[in-house]
Image: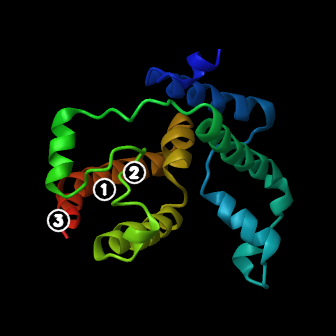
Amino acid sequence: MLEFLQQPWPWYTAGIIIGLTVPALLILGNKHFGISANLRHICAACFPAGVKFFQYDWKKELWNFFFVGGIIAGAFIASHWLANPNPVQIAPALATELQGYGLTDFSGMVPAELVSWESLFTLRGFILLVVGGFLVGFGTRYAGGCTSGHAIMGLSNLQWPSLIATCCFMAGGFLMANLILPFILQL
């Protein structure tokens, strides 16, 4: 059984699970799927500091803490006991392109030259990790939710703002991957 769990699964498996999560949340408790709002709930629970934005009944969203806890626990279990022992496989053309940018460590899910404590103190690492993290956080709040909230939950509820947000997320992703990221990787 453990061998079966360690093998790469078909891409559509996650889609089916996520697709079933949305109606389950709606049917079982009229709950909405999304991850980014949990940071607001954590701040409201731990550091309200009299800020109006954090003054609401965060206890109604307590189930979200268990959801995020499950994500963290699942990631820990998967990385420690269910990890595929084989090296990560990427397309040879991608490996050649990444080597042109000086990225050669393909032993993990992301190259260590991009995401590590050492890379954080380089210009390229600072832009990708700190500036990129800030932009993702700012964009999430500005859009009123993250990609999972808008693209999965919002679109399934036929919400017009979620369609606009999802189109903007996709356009931003295409722009970043094809125009901006190659420039940053050359730094």
- Does 81 sit left or right of 140 as displayed? right
| Residue, disc 3 | 186
Alpha carbon separation for disc pair 3 and 1: 20 Å
- Does 40 sit left or right of 164 as displayed? right
The one nearer the camera, 87 or 32, is: 87
Q: Where is residue 33 shown, x and y percent of the image?
A: 64, 43
Which residue is painted at 74% across and 63% down in the image? Answer: 41
Alpha carbon separation for disc pair 3 and 2: 32 Å
Which residue is painted at 71% across and 29% down in the image? Answer: 24
Q: Amino acid at mark 1?
A: Gly
Measured along the vertical axis of the image, is residue 18 above or below residue 146?
A: above
| Residue, disc 1 | 172
In the image, which is nearer the foreground, mark 3 or mark 2? 3
Q: Amino acid at mark 3?
A: Gln
Q: Amino acid at mark 2?
A: Ile
In the image, which is nearer the foreground, mark 1 or mark 2? 1
In the image, which is nearer the foreground, mark 3 or mark 1? 3
Q: Where is residue 5 shown, x and y percent of the image?
A: 59, 22
Measured along the vertical axis of the image, is residue 130 above or below residue 90?
A: below
In this rendering, the count of numbered labels is 3
Which residue is painted at 43% across and 25% down in the image? Answer: 11
Badge 1 or badge 2: first in the primary sequence: 2
Q: Where is residue 99 shown, x and y percent of the image?
A: 18, 50
| Residue, disc 2 | 164
Q: Quadrant of residue 70?
A: top right
Badge 3 or badge 1: first in the primary sequence: 1
The one nearer the camera, 90 or 53, is: 90
Marks 3,2: beta carbons within 8 A: no
User: What residue occupies the far bottom of the structure in this picture?
Assistant: 50
Badge 3 density bin: few <14, some 14–19, many ≥20, Cα 10 Å: few
User: Which quarter shows the C terminus?
Assistant: bottom left
